[in-house]
Amino acid sequence: MSAGTISTPASTGSGLTASGRPLAALRHRDFRVLLGSSMALQVGSWVQTIAQGWLILHDLGGSATDLGLVALLRGASLILLSPVGGYLAGKLERRRQLVVYTSLSACVAALLAVLTATGTIEIWMVYATALAAGVVDALAGPIRQLLVYDSVGGEDLTNAVALNALGGNAMRVIGPAIGGALIGATGTQGAFQMQAACLVLAAILTWRLKPSPPEISEHVGMFRSIAGGLAYIVRDRRMLVIVAMALLPSILVYPYVTFLPVFARDVLNSDEKGYGYLAASVGLGSLLGGAIVAFTAGKGRMGPGMIWTCLFYCLAVGAFTLTRNLWLGVAVLAVAGIFHSIYSALNASLMQLKADPEYRSRVMSLQTMTWGLTPFAALVMGQMIDRWGAPHVVGAFMAAASALTIVFLITSRELRRI
């Protein structure tokens, strides 16, 4: 095990926290702290998602294309700077970096709250703050992923990933509901104030983690290090397939979330509360999905489970595009959340477990980069929605994603063996 992957010594645990049990990762003190930090971050993130979407579409009179452009600016930052974040995650002490990045995110949220409260907010300001938030996310993303491994080691990693996702998805239920309620009660500025408070709490909890020693000890330049990580992915067929399976939903499936305000207003004839319900329903289903992974971690091969749940996720979102009733849509998205949670936990676990230790930070930077591709696809999707409508466009994307997933299922022996 490399220096960068030293985990906090764990207690032996008992009952549900014993080794191999559903809550095994909670034996590790640092994981418990990290989980609290991540949950605070997730609440703030989902409150911000609801507030920003409603700010653009309702308060500023924007369109689906405007939603896509804001997401694009953030995604461009992830694509361009995530490799830098991965390099720094392996080169410098991770805890200190993450505290700085989380604090900067809190400042961005506070700025949005002030601009909105004073009535001086304009669409270009939303673009600028989205770009700033994307830069911070690109640098922080690989670190937060790696700290899960640092806190538990390899034995409890899948369980830790599942519990981390479970906590995040619980906040995904709470966050949108809080966001919708705050917008209705205080306006969008109240939601941004809530986000800033959550990020401050996340930074305080992160500081309580033990330092994580760097894993890149040799004197290698940043660009050479990044190129070495990409070369490793290309020559390792197994890792290449795992990364490809992370790319597929990022490009073809995840963009639909950006346009939930459009579905709420134009397809389901609802308001900001309906938008919050739709966003929360995915998290509600994801809670069950995360529990399934936590209870089954370490049992059987993860590759086949990852690809089948990806396929069912695509099909469930496709079914959502056919609904015209708010509560039916909420129920269908909850089912989609179950499959999404299982798929994403298995994919994230495989990325860390199957990567060589010396390349782990750079592999995780690629995962953050895949998140950055989603807004580029969202821009295309948004322009198509403005022309042909959300149900037809999102449905077509889901059909394409389902077909490609089936191709992976049939042709990739590497996935079926791991």
Image (cartoon, rainbow, N blue to C red):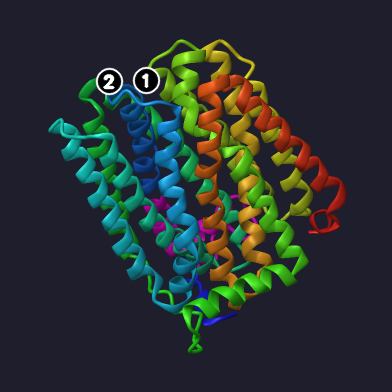
Residue bounds of the magenta highlight: 10-38
- Residue at left 60%, top 20%? 391
Badge 2 or badge 1: first in the primary sequence = 2
Q: Is residue 6 above or below residue 383?
A: below
In what element is the residue under mark 2? Answer: helix
Task: Find residue 225 and report its image quarter.
Answer: bottom right
Are the two marked residues, 2 and 1, in contact with CB atoms closer than 8 angstroms?
yes
Of the residues shown, which amino acid type is indicated by label 1? Glu
Q: Which residue in the protein does label 2 denote?
A: 184
Horizontal side of residue 148 vs 314, given as left or right: left
Q: Is residue 411 above or below residue 333?
A: below
Q: Which mark, residue 272?
A: 1
Q: Position of residue 132 (x, y in %)?
A: 32, 52
- Residue at left 59%, top 58%? 18
Closer to us: 112 or 156: 112
- Mark 1 neighbour class, 10 Å CA radius: few under 14, some 14 to 19, many 20 or more: many
- Residue at left 43%, top 55%? 77
